[in-house]
Image (cartoon, rainbow, N blue to C red):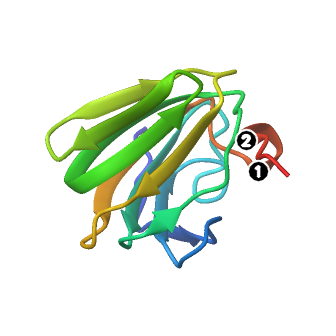
Amino acid sequence: MPTLIPSPQRIVPAGNKPKLIDEYVGRVNSSTEAVSVAHMRSPGGWVEPCQTPEFDEFTVVLRGLLRVEHRDGVLDVRAGQAVVTHRGEWIRYSTPQDDGAEYIAVCLPAFSPETVHRDA
């Protein structure tokens, strides 16, 4: 039988500015460890701590620009584009433009604070 997810759960984010994370599927809202699906809204100038996660992340940018820093450089992902980051890669997400960004993030396996491995 299908499982209805009636609403997302708001997650407390990391970063230098307030960001909205609404998890639809994942460890918090649906007790799903295999995958997480979240709707993100980041303000302009937001920067997340660097991380080396134990999960793959598939991100679709709906509005604005999401910057992805990695060991070999920087990738700017714009509305209508997507990016895949791979487990074990050092990365940092940010939204450098004034209007911020809105995007959907899917993590396999599901995101958890214990497996994101943020830099000190």
Q: Residue 45's quadrant in the figure?
A: bottom left
User: Is 95 displayed left or right of 9 in the figure?
Assistant: left
Amino acid type at image mark 1? Pro
In the displayed structure, 68 sits above or below 30; it is above
Residue 1 pos. (x, y %): 43, 38
In the displayed structure, 18 sits above or below 21; it is below
Q: How many marks?
A: 2
Q: Residue at x 50, y 37 (%)?
A: 69
Amino acid type at image mark 2? Val
Q: Are marks 1 and 2 in contact (CB under 8 Å)?
A: yes
The disc label shown at residue 113, or none: 1
SS of the residue under disc 1: helix
Between the residue at mark 1 and the residue at mark 2, the CA separation in whole angstroms equals 6 Å
User: Is 90 displayed left or right of 59 in the figure?
Assistant: right
Q: Residue furthest bottom?
A: 18
Residue 118 pos. (x, y %): 76, 46
User: Is 87 displayed left or right of 99 in the figure?
Assistant: right
Residue 79 pos. (x, y %): 17, 47
Q: Residue 6's quadrant in the figure?
A: bottom left
Front position in the image: 35 or 5: 35
Q: Residues within 10 Å of mark 2 (few under 14, many from 20)?
A: some
Q: Is residue 35 visible?
A: yes
Q: Residue at x 40, y 67 (%)?
A: 42
Q: Residue furthest front?
A: 73
Front position in the image: 62 or 32: 62
SS of the residue under disc 2: helix
Q: Residue 17's quadrant in the figure?
A: bottom right
Q: Label 2 belongs to which residue?
A: 116
